Image (tube, rainbow, N blue to C red):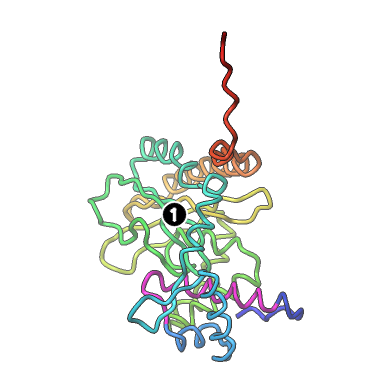
Amino acid sequence: MKPPPKNEGAQSIGRAALLLRTLSTFGSQGASLMQICTLTQLPKATVHRILSAMQEEHLVERPWGTRHYRLGPEVYAFGMSVLNVFDIKTIAQPSFERLAQTTGETVYLGIRCGYDAVCLDKRQGHLPQNAEILQVNDRWPMGIGSFSLAILAHLPNDEIADILAFNRLRSGEDKTFSKLTSSIHNTLKNGYALTKTRSARGISGIAVPIFDRRRYPIASLCAVSTLDRMKGSYLSGLAATLRHEADIMSAQYELARMNPAQAETWRTAIKDPPPQRIAF
């Protein structure tokens, strides 16, 4: 895990953020105190103290009848307050439609969520329904699948190391995550992530990152097709098409961040009505 900041206040915030990221990987089922301690490698007393404080603020909750912790309602509410600023799913719709029409492939939109990548949206292509493993709202550890690998490879090195260490510990798959070093190198070299399923499905995925203005990866655009199609000039052309749409989405994302618009309708509710004029 990342070394905690030296400043006491910053250390507390960093640890709280670590716990929130860890809980996000467990989804609605939540995690036990022991599971959280194991993954964060923090003392049990420290984890319990921070979770209790966040529970008081409704950032964390313990579902009735369980001893597990999960993200609380305030986290959801906070996200809703900036939905119009970071709504990459809405921004992606025109690109999705163009990709679906021009390529005929199944396309995905993914975003990073802590140590995971989440599939936000999907457009079905020529592959049979549900031939792909990844479905909308699925959470996969960062680095598993091209849609998450494209994001992971373009993160700063210290974040990559932290994510790989966490997911290696979480999954118990040391071999799988150790191999990702070469996959990250190839992704940076080629400009896209390319993976194939280990099952007998015979499909392959290609993905490119979507950057913000700092060249920080915020999401990914992915296309999935059969192994026999994902090669040569077709693969190069598909990569170029994905990059073109990713560049458009990056520009639109920054435009939305720079020009947020949200009406404060509550002001109307408390505003005194204008005085009535009586005509004589």
Camera-side residue: 198 or 96?
Answer: 96
Residue at point 52%, 48% (across, down): 83
Residue drawn at the location 57% of the way across and 78% of the way down? 53
What's the magenta region? 11-31
Residue 14 lies in the magenta stretch: yes
254 over 196 or under it: above or below? above
Amino acid type of the residue tagged 1 in the rendering = Ile
Q: Position of residue 141 (x, y in %)?
A: 45, 70
Secondary structure beneath dot 1 equals strand
Residue 272 coordinates in the image, percent (x, y): 59, 34
- Asked whether residue 262 is in view, the answer is no
Picture coordinates of residue 12 (x, y %)? Answer: 66, 78
Position of the C terminus, as image quadrant, is top right
The answer to whether 90 is drawn above or below residue 138 in the figure is above
**Name of the residue lying farthest toward the front:** 280
Residue count near mark 1 (Cα–Cα under 10 Å), binned few <14, some 14–19, many ≥20: many
**Up-down relation of residue 36 to residue 96 (above or below):** below
Q: Nearer the viewer, residue 16 or 138?
A: 16
